[in-house]
Image: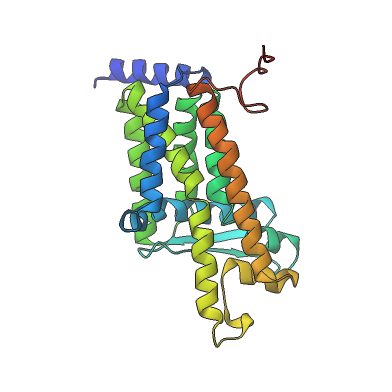
Amino acid sequence: MNSAQLVDHGSSLLDRLTTTQAQPPWWLVAGAAVVALLLVGYTPVWRITRNVVTIAHEGGHALVALLTGRRLNSIRLHSDTSGLTVSSGKPYGLGMILTAMAGYPAPPLLGLAFAALLGSSRITLMLWTTIVLLAVMLLKVRNVYGVLTVVGLGALVFAVSWFGTDTLQAGFAYLAAWVLLFAGARPVIELQRGRRRQLRGRHTGDVDSDADQLARLTHVPGLFWVLVFGVIAVVSLVLGAGLLVSDAAEVCVPLLSDGSCPAPA
């Protein structure tokens, strides 16, 4: 690609960022949903897919830490799909509570935000929003595996958005949104299973999950926070699915479809 082609491609990209794209056919949206369900539900593949969810999870902690005035020190992503976000500030209070709470809701809420963009036919904007978020997160990643994971995912999204056909871009974007929406609940289920194992024969103060950190900060049982995470995941999935399906399948969903639904005959 020479310089003239590069400039022309960049100009075309700018136009696509500020305009809408054609809605993909219903079979592509449905196919992306099926593939996403397999990526989340099939355990051998989930071990890979969960890396994407961990990026969103730790990104949620990091974003809320900054928004609440805490100092963000580092983000680490590990090969076992765990992660750690370290921020400094008061070890108590609203800022700490919101930061601890932000991890598990982040993937489904991000999926819901992506679904809103796709439901508004903003496919290119959704892809480049992802690239920007990954680039910003990379600034605070402090281990080699984390850097490789974030850079690799960012490179994949860039390649699809820059070189991919319209159909490939739409399929990839809808797949990403579906994965985040479907993946909201599984980590919450795994969280509770892990808590149950850890709590056997141990004191509650020894368990260090997000829910148990919140329990110590708020004096509200950890199970309550697990339920809050689960409700957010389910509500995000229902709303996000409505946004993704309504226009592509030409189904009018009140409050979600563009415009107003026609009155029944």
Residue 160 location, x and y as percent? Answer: 33, 32
Residue 242 location, x and y as percent? Answer: 56, 32
Give above or below for 217 relative to 64: below
Q: Nearer the viewer, residue 211 or 84?
A: 211
Q: Quadrant of residue 134?
A: top left
Q: Nearer the viewer, residue 58 or 205?
A: 205
Residue 147 location, x and y as percent? Answer: 37, 54
Work out which residue is located at the far left of the displayed protein and give it. Answer: 1
Residue at 59% from the left image edge and 48% from the top image edge = 234
Residue at 69% from the left image edge and 55% from the top image edge = 69
Residue 159 location, x and y as percent? Answer: 32, 33
In this picture, residue 225 sits left or right of residue 57: right
Give above or below for 169 relative to 241: above
Q: Which of 45 and 94 is in front in this view?
A: 45
Q: Nearer the viewer, residue 8 or 19?
A: 19
**Quarter occupied by the C terminus:** top right
Q: In this rendering, does residue 251 appear at all?
A: yes
Q: Quadrant of residue 77?
A: bottom left
**Quarter occupied by the N terminus:** top left
Give above or below for 113 relative to 15: below
Q: Quadrant of residue 80?
A: bottom left
Give above or below for 110 relative to 2: below
